[in-house]
Amino acid sequence: MNSISSLDENSPPPLLVVLSGPSGVGKDAALECLKKLDRPWHFVVTATTRPQRPGEQDSVDYIFLEPETFARMKDSGDFLECAEVYGRWYGVPRSQVRMGMDAGKDVILKIDVQGAETVRRLAPQAVFIFMVPGNLDELRERLSLRMTESSPEIELRLNTAKDELAMVDKFDYRVVNHDAGLDRVVADIDAIIAAEKCRVKPRIINFT
C-alpha cells in the first residue's frame, strides 16, 4: 500500500502551458473561464505598454507599464520573452513564471504566436496549445465587436492571423473556438492539462 510520502514523490512536476493564437480568437475569454475551474494553476500576468481598456484591471488582466519602465525591464533581462506587436510591447515577467513553478502549480501563459516561438526555444518541454477560430469570418466579427481597433487595424490583424494559422503544426494541440463554443474550448484545455499530468515520462521544465 502506498504511503502519503510515496504518493507525493510520484506527483508530476508542474507544467508550463502556453496558450496562443491569433488576436481576437478568444484567448482572454478562455482564460477567464479556466480561472473559474479552481484548479491548482498559476495564471501569468503579461506586461504591456498598450493603453488600458475599459473594464481591465492593472496587475490582473495585464501589468500596464510606461514604455520607459518596460524598456528598463527589458534591458535588465526581467522578461522571459518580449516582443513588439501592433506597435505595443508585450512581455512575460520571469518572476511570474517562477512564482507559479516554485509553488508547485501548473503555470498557464497566454501569449501571441511570435512569443510562443521564443518560449519554445527556452522551454521546449512546455505544453503548446494553439487556439483557432471556426473561420476567418468569425474572427473578423469578434474583432469588430471589440470596438478597440479601426477598420485598417482589423484588416492588419486578419492578414497576420492568416500567417499565424499556418504555424499550427508547431504546436502540440489545437482547440477550435467556434461561435458560442467557448465551453468546449475550456473543456478541451482542461482535458489536455489533465492528460499531460498522467504522462509516464513527465515534461520537465527548465529555464534560466
Image (tube, grey):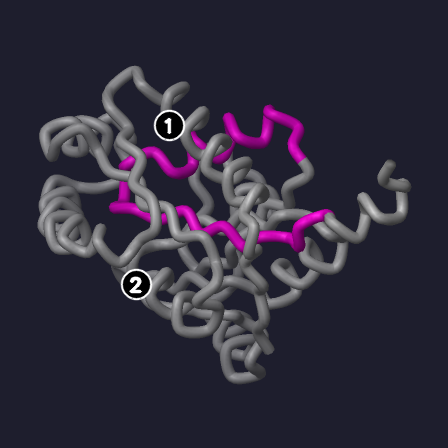
Does residue 203 appear in the picture of this structure?
A: yes
Disc 2 is placed on an element classified as helix
Q: Nearer the viewer, mark 2 or mark 1?
A: 1
Q: Earlier in the sequence, mark 2 or mark 1?
A: 2
Determine the residue positioned at 65% across, 32% down.
39
**Which residue is identified by label 2?**
114
**Which residue is identified by label 1?**
185
Residue 86 on image: x %, y %: 25, 58
Q: Label 1 amino acid?
A: Val
Instruction: Give the farthest residue toward the top.
Output: 180
Residue 189 on image: x %, y %: 44, 34
Q: Residues within 10 Å of mark 2 (few under 14, many from 20)?
A: some
Q: Nearer the viewer, residue 130 or 5?
A: 5
Determine the residue positioned at 34% across, 50% down.
172
Q: Quadrant of residue 208?
A: bottom right
Q: Is residue 123 above or below residue 63?
A: below
Q: Quadrant of residue 69?
A: bottom right
Residue 145 on image: x %, y %: 24, 26
Magenta stretch: give its range.
11-39
Q: Nearer the viewer, residue 111 or 198?
A: 198
Determine the residue positioned at 13% across, 45% down.
158
Instruction: Give the farthest residue toward the front.
Output: 1
Residue 90 highlighted magenta (yes or no) = no
The reply, left or right, for residue 8 in relation to residue 14 is right
